[in-house]
């Protein structure tokens, strides 16, 4: 089973100095309703860090932001330099680079164990650096560079059964294309960037899918890991699984519920739980959880005993604005208007 943490920490990226080890930080306030993307330009000293990220020099034209949860980190990077830019990375974590934009006049990219490349236009390309491999590249940029880095800790992430990412010998890949990985990475990036647009469960689920897609690619499978155990997906969750999972959600409605917790209750891997849950309920776990929160909020508003702010806090939203945005997205009207319409 893919192992994710019971806690979900959204963390700002500290500013990094030139030629310093760069990493995600842990000193932050975690909201209870939805992760927040926090970032800043690279201009000051490094501060407390957790694990290394890609080193980029010079850093004065780099903007970095991202978030981290157990076993995974995501970093959004914008480089606007008009001069040579150097990248370097070697870590005990796997790295997936997804390029959204970038054209160079000159440059070279190199991953230990893979042929070098002087490809000029890297937009739409993917690069995978296995843990322990040295990755280096330099650009004489023609256009700004936009790239999303995904970091995976193989010691903290398990696939089905007793198989760990540590046990899988990944191969380095430089500037390749894969539609499934691109689509999943784009959804994950959008979920992180959109204020109030995604929950913990949704972001965790996308991370799970991304890992499985990488495993599928590495194994050279002709079909996605999602088709494995297709009979389970077609049948959905058993009745006992549905009861125990929905009961747990109801009992912890106002809390952030880790995807791994629900999967353990159903005795499934996280990946297959997500597929089976959607087959049974028609929506992913995160959307079901959100819908139940809003139904509870509607019931409380109908009692006319609580303010909109009190209702939002009760069902797990730390800010009225985020509660209002989600409520309106699901019901088509704001909590205040819904409250007034009840008469």
Image (cartoon, rainbow, N blue to C red):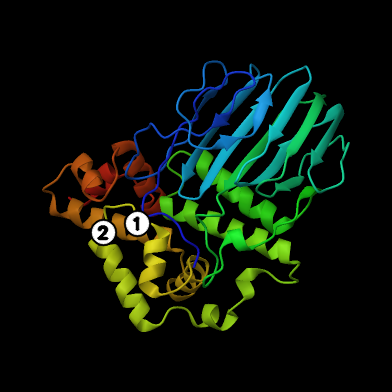
Q: Secondary structure at mark 2?
A: loop
Expressed as whole percent of the image width and height from the top left, the position of residue 126 reads 74, 47
Relative image position of residue 17 (x, y in whole percent):
58, 18
Nearer the observer, 57 or 169: 169
Q: Nearer the viewer, residue 160 or 126?
A: 160
Query: At 19% across and 51% down in the image, what residue appears?
Result: 301
The residue nearer to you, when weighing 54 against 141, is: 54
- Residue at mark 2 to residue at mark 1: CA–CA distance: 7 Å
Residue at 21% across, 48% down = 314
Query: Mark 2, residues whose alpha carbon is within 10 Å: few (<14), some, or many (≥20)?
Result: some
Instruction: Examine the rendering and report whether any part of residue 144 can be seen.
Output: no
The total of numbered circles placed on residues is 2
Could you say whether the residue bearing mark 1 is in a helix, strand or loop?
A: loop
Q: Residue most toward the left?
A: 305
Image x and y of residue 59, in percent? 64, 20
Residue assigned mark 1: 257
Please tell me whether residue 36 is drawn above or below residue 277 in the rendered image. Answer: above
Residue 27 shown left or right of residue 139 in the figure: left
Q: Could you tell me residue 191's position as x and y percent? A: 52, 46
Q: Measured along the vertical axis of the image, is residue 194 above or below residue 78?
A: below
Reply above or below: 64 against 226.
above
- Residue in view at x 52 percent, y 62 percent: 158
Which residue is under mark 2?
252
Kindly tell me whether residue 189 is visible in this rendering. yes
Q: Is residue 233 above or below residue 71?
A: below
Instruction: In this rendered view, identify the residue nearer to me: 316 or 11.
Output: 11
Q: Are marks 2 and 1 in contact (CB under 8 Å)?
A: yes
Q: Residue at x 33, y 37 (%)?
A: 321
């Amino acid at each position: 089973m893919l192992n994710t943490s019971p806690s979900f920490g959204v963390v700002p990226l500290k500013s990094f100095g030139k030629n310093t080890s760069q990493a995600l930080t842990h000193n932050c306030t975690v909201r209870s309703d939805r992760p927040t993307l926090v970032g800043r330009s690279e201009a000051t000293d490094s501060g407390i860090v957790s694990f290394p990220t890609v080193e980029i020099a010079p850093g004065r034209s780099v903007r970095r932001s991202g978030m981290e949860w157990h076993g995974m980190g995501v970093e959004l990077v914008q480089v606007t330099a008009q001069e040579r830019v150097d990248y370097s990375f070697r870590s005990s974590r796997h790295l997936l680079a997804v390029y959204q934009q970038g054209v160079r006049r000159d440059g070279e990219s190199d991953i230990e164990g893979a042929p070098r490349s002087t490809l000029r236009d890297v937009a739409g390309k993917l690069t995978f650096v296995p843990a322990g491999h040295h990755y280096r590249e330099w650009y004489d940029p023609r256009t700004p560079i936009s790239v999303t880095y995904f970091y995976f800790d193989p010691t903290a992430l398990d696939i089905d059964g007793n198989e760990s990412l540590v046990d899988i010998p990944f191969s380095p890949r430089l500037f390749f294309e894969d539609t499934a990985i691109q689509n999943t990475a784009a959804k994950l990036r959008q979920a992180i960037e959109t204020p109030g647009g995604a929950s913990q469960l949704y972001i965790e689920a996308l991370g799970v899918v991304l890992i499985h897609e990488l495993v599928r690619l590495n194994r050279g499978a002709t079909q996605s890991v999602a088709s494995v155990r297709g009979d389970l997906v077609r049948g959905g969750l058993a009745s006992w699984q549905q009861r125990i999972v929905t009961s747990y959600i109801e009992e912890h409605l106002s809390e952030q519920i880790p995807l791994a917790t629900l999967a353990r209750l159903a005795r499934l891997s996280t990946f297959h739980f997500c597929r089976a849950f959607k087959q049974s309920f028609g929506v992913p776990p995160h959307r079901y959880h959100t819908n139940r929160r809003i139904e509870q909020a509607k019931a409380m508003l109908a009692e006319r005993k609580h303010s909109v702010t009190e209702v939002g806090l009760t069902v797990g939203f730390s800010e009225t604005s985020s509660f209002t945005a989600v409520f309106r997205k699901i019901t088509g009207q704001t909590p205040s208007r819904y409250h007034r319409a009840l008469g």
